[in-house]
Image (tube, helix red, strand yellow):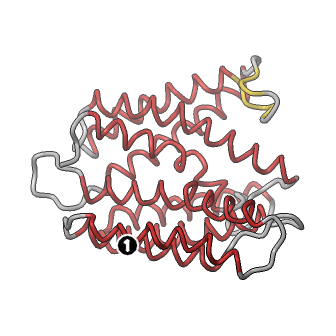
């Protein structure tokens, strides 16, 4: 099987799984993002592990899973977040565990362990908050369509950036990290994403067209920086892909780098315009 065909099959299968899982029902949404956050965090720890860095893989992953399940349960049941206070001693326990590991550079290990959770787990928790916590003056308890719409914007931006950038890209966007990305591709991706935002306003009307347009600008801008951040990480440790779980497309971080960085900004925008109770 040639590389193009492999990439096409993997890409279409991945897109189909994401669309069905997010839009089918809340349970499938929870399952897919529990899996993504778990595999993504494990992938991150594997990437950064070296002779001098030893993240706490098992404690970090277990803590992330517990926080995800607890936060999701609280959001789905619209329960107060008092139980999330358990995160304080759990995160503090990462410091205590390091005392017993007898590894070099203990505080570097602690920092990398917690950084992985901030990079992977926090954005996924914010997706859960958006999906279950929006209050758009209706009685619908689950708005996974907003998350799907944001992912559509990322896909649209990537497609537009590639099509325009590969044809007329001349001015480098961030040559030190990504020699192929261009300003022409960036604005091409923005235009396609704005069209996708209009489509989102029809498919997922929980946000108005103007709100989706603003979200698209946020997603394209911060998502591009998220992609550059992932490439910066890979260049710093000398790897091409973050993993090989998706043949021809790399790993979880490669597929969600733009989403992970853009979602916190989208969440903050939705908070500012009063979309949460």
- Residue at the disc numbered 1: 28
| Place of residue 72 in the rendered image (x, y in percent of width and height, measured from the top left) | 33, 69
Picture quadrant where residue 227 is located: top right
Q: Which residue is drawn at 60% across and 71% down?
A: 94
Helix, strand or loop at mark 1? helix
Looking at the image, how many numbered discs can be counted on the residues? 1
In-image side of 267 versus 160 (left or right): left
| Place of residue 7 in the rendered image (x, y in percent of width and height, measured from the top left) | 70, 57
Q: In this view, does 106 lie above or below 111?
A: below
Q: Which residue is drawn at 75% across and 49% down?
A: 233
In-image side of 175 versus 74 (left or right): right
In-image side of 113 versus 48 (left or right): left
Task: Name the residue nearer the viewer: 202 or 259.
Answer: 259
Q: Which residue is drawn at 70% across and 57% down?
A: 249
Q: Residue at x 75, y 60 (%)?
A: 108
| Place of residue 112 in the rendered image (x, y in percent of width and height, measured from the top left) | 69, 60
Q: Is residue 274 above or below residue 135?
A: above
Picture quadrant where residue 10 is located: bottom right
Task: Name the residue nearer the viewer: 51 or 68.
Answer: 51
Mark 1 is surrounded, within 10 Å at the Cα level, by few (under 14), some (14 to 19) or many (20 or more) other residues, namely some
Q: Residue at the top extreme?
A: 171
Location of the N terminus (image quadrant): bottom right
Task: Name the residue nearer the viewer: 162 or 117.
Answer: 117
| Place of residue 117 in the rendered image (x, y in percent of width and height, measured from the top left) | 56, 62
């Amino acid at each position: 099987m040639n590389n193009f065909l492999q990439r096409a099959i993997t890409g279409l299968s991945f897109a189909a799984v994401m669309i069905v899982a997010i839009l089918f029902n809340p349970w499938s949404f929870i399952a897919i993002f529990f899996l993504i956050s778990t595999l993504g965090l494990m992938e991150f720890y594997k990437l950064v592990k070296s002779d001098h860095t030893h993240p706490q893989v098992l404690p970090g992953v277990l803590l992330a899973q517990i926080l995800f399940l607890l936060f999701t349960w609280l959001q789905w049941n619209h329960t107060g977040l008092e139980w999330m206070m358990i995160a304080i001693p759990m995160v503090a326990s990462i410091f205590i565990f390091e005392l017993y590991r007898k590894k070099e550079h203990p505080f570097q290990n602690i920092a990398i362990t917690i950084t992985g959770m901030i990079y992977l787990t926090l954005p996924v928790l914010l997706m859960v908050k958006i999906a279950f916590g929006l209050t758009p003056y209706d009685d619908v308890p689950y708005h996974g369509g907003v998350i799907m719409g944001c992912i559509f914007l990322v896909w649209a931006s990537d497609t537009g950036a590639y099509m325009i950038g590969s044809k007329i890209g001349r001015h480098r966007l961030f040559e030190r990290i990504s020699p192929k990305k261009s300003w022409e591709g960036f604005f091409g991706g923005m235009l396609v994403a704005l069209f996708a935002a209009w489509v989102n306003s029809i498919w997922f009307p929980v946000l108005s067209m103007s709100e989706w347009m603003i979200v698209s600008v946020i997603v394209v801008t911060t998502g591009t920086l998220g992609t550059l951040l992932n490439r910066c990480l890979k260049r710093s440790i000398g790897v091409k892909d973050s993993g090989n779980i998706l043949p021809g497309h790399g790993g979880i971080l490669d597929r969600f780098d733009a989403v992970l960085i853009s979602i916190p900004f989208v969440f903050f925008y939705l908070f500012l315009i009063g979309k949460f109770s």
